[in-house]
Amino acid sequence: MPDLPAPDLPPRPLRWLFLDLNSYFASVEQQLEPAYRGRPLIVAPVDSDTTVAIAASIEAKRYGITTGTPVWEAKRLCRDLVVTPARHDRYVAFHQAIVAEIWKFIPVTQVCSIDEVACRLLDNENDREQAMTLARRIKAGIRANIGGCLQSSVGIAPNRLLAKLASDMQKPDGLTVLEARELPARLFPLALRDIAGIGPRMERRLAQKGINDIRELCARRPRDAGSAWGGTDGDRLWYLLHGVDLPQKPTQSRTIGHSHVLSPQKRGLEPTRLTARRLALKAASRLRRKGYRSRLLMLHGRFEDDKSSWRATARLPPTQDSFVILDALDRLFPRLADAGRQRPGGFRLRMVGVTLAEIEPTGPDQSSLFALLDPDDPLARETRGLALSRAMDRMNERFGRNAVTVGPLHGGRIDRVGTKIAFGRIPDLDEFHE
């Protein structure tokens, strides 16, 4: 398709600075342990060859080891490899220190993930040389005040999408600027999948419409690009790739949940049940801390011999009470047990998860209105349960994880369910006490 003249575009000065910490988890481990510095290292969920790397150091990546590489394969690729278990609480603590350091130079507009932040440049900061100087000062401040092992790549561009793409162009320790006069031609060497939101399915869809790379997408008129995408987002993407700084679409959290991959020896019925209860208590505690209540509980899992997921749901009264949530979980679990017993080899669940959905902010606390109800009234029971749930939160925060809990956590029958860093969500430090 021949190139079509682009519509008139507004001025597109440099507006965003995007910072991506390189090999973040592995770099934190190297900062904490001087003996690991300069050595190929991976971070794994547990000390087992059957798991996969959740992070690889810059040195390990030179051997072809990346996130998702099985530990046994990583050891084959590099005989001198260091394997260390993840310490998520330390990664959150370093993250908070790094964000505070960046604030010394520029306000942090959005924390995008545990290792990525986006900062909007002011009018007196968007000259190319001024923006690059600012980026170098931030990078130097992190190395000097947080840790010399913590390298970062920075992208500077007219909008946040392009700044993110720029930060990926030079790693490690890179600094890349994309100016409006270079767009979109500077993006043509990139693959479509380098753009956030384009995965295998969207790539196939675009190919069916005759779009196989960024050049062909940008050659369309904005409306035609939107039609190929399948909605207004294609139109939006066209303008973003040409440097227009569009407002961010608002997002709202709709679920709170946790999942856990069970160790091979803990995949039976009872360890799974205890693990699911622990996950439900963690989710309920987060729900209260954020001031939400839920109307729907989902229990989900994945069996050893099945690539598809099993799931079931139970309606809840609008609640943030751990006891109400546990009662609903107890009603769902027999269905999971029946599904597992019917499988060849019996009940062997690899992953279990609990999610609280249809969440909404809580209103003013009205518990005092129910103090004189009959003790056996359902509303009175829920009021007492919520008060007890909040008291458990306070005791666990003060005295540590599992200082007070519901049901047994002894006898080695349950995996340790710790807080982990999910993609796109950074746990509060309070969660490491739950």
Image (cartoon, helix red, strand yellow):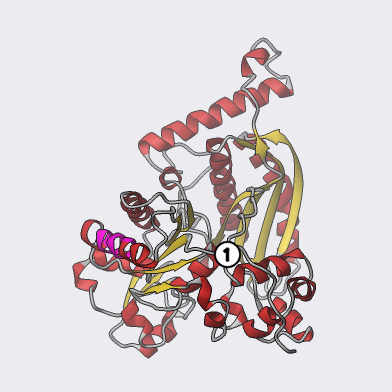
Mark 1 residue element: loop
Q: Residue 219 at x, y = what percent? A: 69, 82
User: Hey, which quadrant is residue 36 in on the image?
Assistant: bottom left
In the rendered image, residue 258 lying in the magenta stretch gets the answer no
Q: Nearer the viewer, residue 236 or 89?
A: 236
Taking 265 as reference, is 184 above or below it? below
Residue 206 visible, this angle: yes
Q: Residue 120 at x, y = what percent? A: 46, 55
Left or right of 209, for residue 196: left
Range covered by the magenta-colored residues: 134-142
Q: Nearer the viewer, residue 364 or 43?
A: 364
User: Hey, which quadrant is residue 228 in on the image?
Assistant: bottom right
Residue 347 visible, this angle: no
Taking 61 as reference, is 155 above or below it? above
Q: Residue 395 at x, y = what percent? A: 42, 32
Q: Nearer the viewer, residue 235 or 72?
A: 235
Q: Residue at x 67, y 16 (%)?
A: 375
